[in-house]
C-alpha cells in the first residue's frame, strides 16, 4: 500500500535539506540519505538518493482500521453465534421459575429452538420436572421428591419464590412439560434418576418425541439403558470436568454428544471432541462474550438461562 520510495537528487549539497524537510513534513516516513555520490553503490558521482521508508499509517488510516476491526468483530461474533444452538436451561429460567410450564412457554415465546429440563420420580413413580433432590429451594414445601407423591407435589407453589406474579405455578409432570415443548422446540431431558424405559417410551410416544428428544445424564448407566431400550433417542454424556477418557466412554455408550461445564471447555477440548466425531454442548452460559467464545471454539450448543442471549435458528435443533 505504501511502497518505500527513493528520490534521486542531482545536487548532493541540497540532500541534507531535503532529508530534514521530509522528516518535518512526513512524520510517518523515515528519511535517509543513501549512495551519496558513490558510484560503487550504484549512484553516479554527484547523483544521490533520498530514501523514504513508510513507518506507520496516517492518522485517518488508524480510525478506518479501528472501525473496520470493530465491524469485523461484530460480524465474526454474529457468525460464531449463527452456528450455535441455544438450549433453554430449565426453560427460560432467568425470567420465569425454573422447570415449570411458565419457563418453557417463555423459552418458546423467545424463539428458543431447544428446552432442557430435569426429570425425577415421585414416591408413586410419576416422572416430574424438578432439578433438586428436595422441593425446598423452589417451592413453598419441603422434603425429598422421591418421598412425596404426585398429589403432594400438586399442593406446592413452585412459582412464588421467583416472583409473586408466578404464584400458583405447579411442578409439572414430564408429560405436562412435553405438552408445552414438543413440536415447538427440541425437548432435552436430563435424567437425574434412572427411569424405566417403558415409562419413558409411554410418555414420549404420544408427543412424537421418541425420534426427536435428546436425553442427557451424568450417569453412564442411565444413558446405557436408554440406548439399549430406546435406540431412536439421541443421547449425550454430561460431565463437570474434562478428561480425555470421557470420549471413549461417550463413544462406548453410543452418545453423539458430550455436554461439558463451560469452565471445562477449551479449544483443545473442543478439537478432541470433534475429532472423535462427537458434538459438544456446554452449560451454563449466561454471558454473550462467553457464548461467542464457545462459538469460536466450535461448540454447537449452549445451555443457557437466557435463551435470548444469542439468536439461533430452529434448523439447528433438527441437525443436532
Ligand atoms: O443439562 C445440563 C445442565 O443442566 C447440568 O447441570 O445442575 O443445571 O442440571 P444442572
Ligand atoms: Ca439439568
Image (spheres, rainbow, N blue to C red):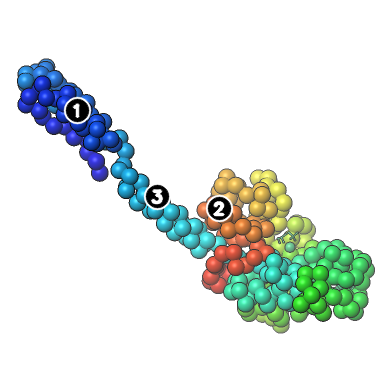
Find residue 293 and name its label. 2
Quarter of the render that holds ligand 1: bottom right
Instruction: Report the quarter where the N terminus lies.
Output: top left
Q: Is residue 186 above or below residue 297?
A: below
As drawn, is 74 to the left or to the right of 101? left
CA gap, disc 1 and disc 3: 31 Å
Please name which of the two marks, 1 or 3, marks the residue nearer to the observer.
1
Residue placed under numbered mark 1 in the picture: 19
**Residues at discs 1 and 2 in contact (Cβ within 8 Å):** no
> Percent x, y for residue 193?
82, 64
Question: Between residues 212 and 56, which one lies in front from this camera angle?
Answer: 56
- Helix, strand or loop at disc 3? helix
Residue placed under numbered mark 3 in the picture: 66
> Percent x, y for residue 128?
81, 73
> Percent x, y for residue 13?
10, 21
Answer with the quarter of the image where residue 124 lies: bottom right
Amino acid at each position: 500500500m505504501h511502497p518505500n520510495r527513493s528520490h534521486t537528487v542531482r545536487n548532493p549539497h541540497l540532500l541534507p535539506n531535503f532529508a530534514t524537510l521530509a522528516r518535518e513534513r512526513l512524520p510517518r516516513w523515515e528519511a535517509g540519505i543513501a549512495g551519496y555520490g558513490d558510484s560503487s553503490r550504484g549512484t553516479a558521482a554527484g547523483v544521490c538518493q533520498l530514501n523514504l521508508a513508510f513507518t506507520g499509517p496516517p492518522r485517518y488510516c488508524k480510525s478506518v482500521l479501528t472501525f473496520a476491526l470493530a465491524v469485523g468483530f461484530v460480524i465474526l461474533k454474529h457468525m460464531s453465534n449463527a452456528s450455535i444452538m441455544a438450549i433453554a436451561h430449565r426453560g427460560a429460567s432467568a425470567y420465569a421459575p425454573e422447570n415449570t410450564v411458565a419457563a418453557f412457554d417463555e423459552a418458546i415465546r423467545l424463539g428458543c429452538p431447544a428446552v432442557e429440563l430435569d426429570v425425577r420420580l415421585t414416591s408413586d413413580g410419576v416422572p416430574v420436572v424438578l432439578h433438586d433432590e428436595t422441593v425446598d429451594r423452589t417451592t413453598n414445601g419441603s422434603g425429598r421428591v422421591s418421598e412425596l407423591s404426585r398429589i403432594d407435589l400438586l399442593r406446592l407453589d413452585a412459582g412464588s419464590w421467583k416472583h409473586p406474579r408466578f404464584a400458583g405455578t405447579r411442578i409439572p409432570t414430564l408429560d405436562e412439560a412435553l405438552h408445552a415443548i414438543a413440536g415447538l422446540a427440541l425437548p432435552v431431558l436430563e435424567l437425574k434418576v434412572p427411569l424405566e424405559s417403558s415409562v419413558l417410551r409411554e410418555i414420549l410416544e404420544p408427543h412424537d418425541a421418541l425420534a426427536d428428544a435428546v436425553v442427557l445424564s451424568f450417569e453412564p448407566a442411565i444413558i446405557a439403558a436408554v440406548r439399549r431400550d430406546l435406540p431412536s433417542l439421541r443421547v449425550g454424556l454430561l460431565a463437570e470436568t474434562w478428561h480425555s477418557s470421557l470420549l471413549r466412554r461417550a463413544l462406548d455408550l453410543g452418545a453423539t454428544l458430550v455436554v461439558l461445564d463451560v469452565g471445562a471447555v477449551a479449544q483443545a477440548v473442543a478439537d478432541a471432541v470433534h475429532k472423535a466425531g462427537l458434538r459438544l454442548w456446554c452449560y451454563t452460559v449466561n454471558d454473550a462474550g462467553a457464548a461467542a467464545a464457545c462459538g469460536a471454539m466450535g461448540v454447537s450448543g449452549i445451555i443457557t438461562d437466557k435463551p435470548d442471549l444469542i439468536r439461533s435458528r430452529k434448523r439447528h435443533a433438527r441437525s443436532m
